[in-house]
Amino acid sequence: MEKNIRYILLGVFVSATLFLTGCKEYLKEEVFSQLAPENYLKTKEGLTSVLYETYAKAANMNSNNSIYVLGPQEFMTDILYQSGDNVEATIRNYREFTWDPNMDFLIQNWDSYYQCIRNANILLENIPSSNLSTAEKSLYEAEARFLRAVSYYKLYFFFGTVPLRTSTSQELSLPRASDDEIKQFITTELKFALENLPTPGAEAQKYRAHKAAASGYLMKFYLNTKNWTDASAISAQFLSSFKNYSLYAQYKDLFKVESENNPEYIWVRPAIASSDRVTANSWSNVSFPDNFKSAPEVGLTFKSTWLNWPNEFRIYDKFYSTFEAADKRKELMITYYTNTSDQRVELRGSDNIRSFKYWPDPNNVGAAHGNDIPEIRLADIILSRAEALNELNGPTEEALQLVNQVRARAGLSGLKLENVLTKEAFREMILLERGHEFYNEGHRRMDLIRTGKFISDAQARGKNAQPFHLLFPIPQVVIDSDPAIKQNPNY
């Protein structure tokens, strides 16, 4: 869908429609329009509006959600630090592993996805009796099931098992599904989507689902559940089937607004610079140091329309020091800057390095920038396949060459088998490579969990990390609203 229409949020209209349907006996007015409440969801116009809203909820980009969906995936890792503004106390709890069910940002990672699931269920229940063509019915069903599966994917790896809502007619109070039920549901839905969605480039509009997106999420699900055999199989299938994807030549430019149509992005959270910030990328606002004027090492000069918030996201010195000297990927970080008094201010040495991975949008609108945020890109498929192959067979030439593809784009020399003699050594090397490749993209927490390093790494940094911290607590407001939902242990 085009950016000017893709997130036309018709939730109010849909909600009003459902409300009017429920009280039509009271109103006693016969409405003969095609858009009457009782038949609105039978029309293409009605179903398309709900579909667009479903995409919006799956992206979860409203207001500051662009940063507070990414943040909880990195604040408790070795990458991201924060200080300033009224969110500092909350983010400190994430960083120090002193979480509780009442913390901010938890509900942002619950509500939007369940709203997506609700909308997907509304679509699936109304598609069969609608006036859509046969082909449109098949497409809308595949899109709805894909978006619903992606929402459950995100809920599962954030909170663990959750209530499995597949119909709007289910009881309001619903307990959490079993682990096997959730896993089976996600894989079944993504396989259906993979079979029935269009091929990349053939989707009806940009940013709508396609086979490569379903394949990528299925591979990621297999990887994060340590199903190495299926992760290896589907990653091989992906690389042989979707030849239109390639690594973008310049890593430094990959995440700029001007480059968002690049051939590496498989699935993104779309952003647009608009005054209502309905789909805004807010990363730049939290990256500028105090009184920032320019950063000579990356050629960035502050523009008067950009915002410099007191909420500041910082990169740990220790993480920065793990990059090889020639690694081009660190060129999106600054270690010093010139302030408004033309003084040089050093950032390195106090965990104060700044990341401009999402380069400020030259056409921003206030706090809103238009950088799409990648959720799956080709580099992830490549490194994930290398990891799956290593877990199955140990270091192999094929797995090594996959890693070297990504390293070559970063300006680094290739690794050799003599550098990684054991499965454990190669696992550590791939984890390091993923950290360098995907910092500030929301992958680090799951990468550390999958490789068994999340708790031990945090403890080594002096944090209060315990095994139960592999999952976040379910928001207390959710527990309070439904007694059938039981809290995760130790919260």
Image (tube, grey):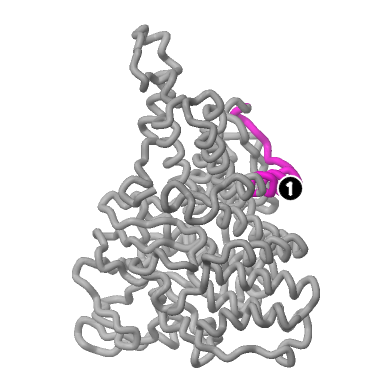
Q: Which residue is pictured at 43% across the width and 31% down the height?
A: 44
Residue 102: image x %, image y %?
Answer: 52, 49
In the rendered image, the residue lying farthest to the top is 28
Residue 63 shown left or right of residue 232 in the figure: left
Of residues 293 and 42, the one drawn nearer to the viewer in this rendering: 42
Residue 72: image x %, image y %?
Answer: 52, 61
Residue to which mark 1 is pinned: 179
Residue 252: image x %, image y %?
Answer: 41, 78
Q: Which residue is pictured at 31% across the width and 70% down the height?
A: 360
Residue 84 shown left or right of residue 300 in the figure: right
SS at mark 1 in the image: helix
Please tell me in which quadrant of the rendered image residue 313 appears.
bottom left
Q: Which residue is pictured at 43% across the width and 67% down the height?
A: 262
Placement of 138 over or under 30, stated as above or below = below
Placement of 187 over or under 92, stated as above or below = above
Q: Amino acid at mark 1?
A: Asp
Magenta portion: prevailing SS class: helix
Residue 417 shown left or right of residue 338 in the figure: right
Q: Is residue 409 shown in magenta? A: no
Placement of 313 over or under 108, stated as above or below = below
Q: What is the span of residues highlighted in magenta in the rendered image?
A: 171-190
Q: Which residue is pictured at 42% across the width and 58% down the height?
A: 66
* Residue 469 visible in the shown view: no
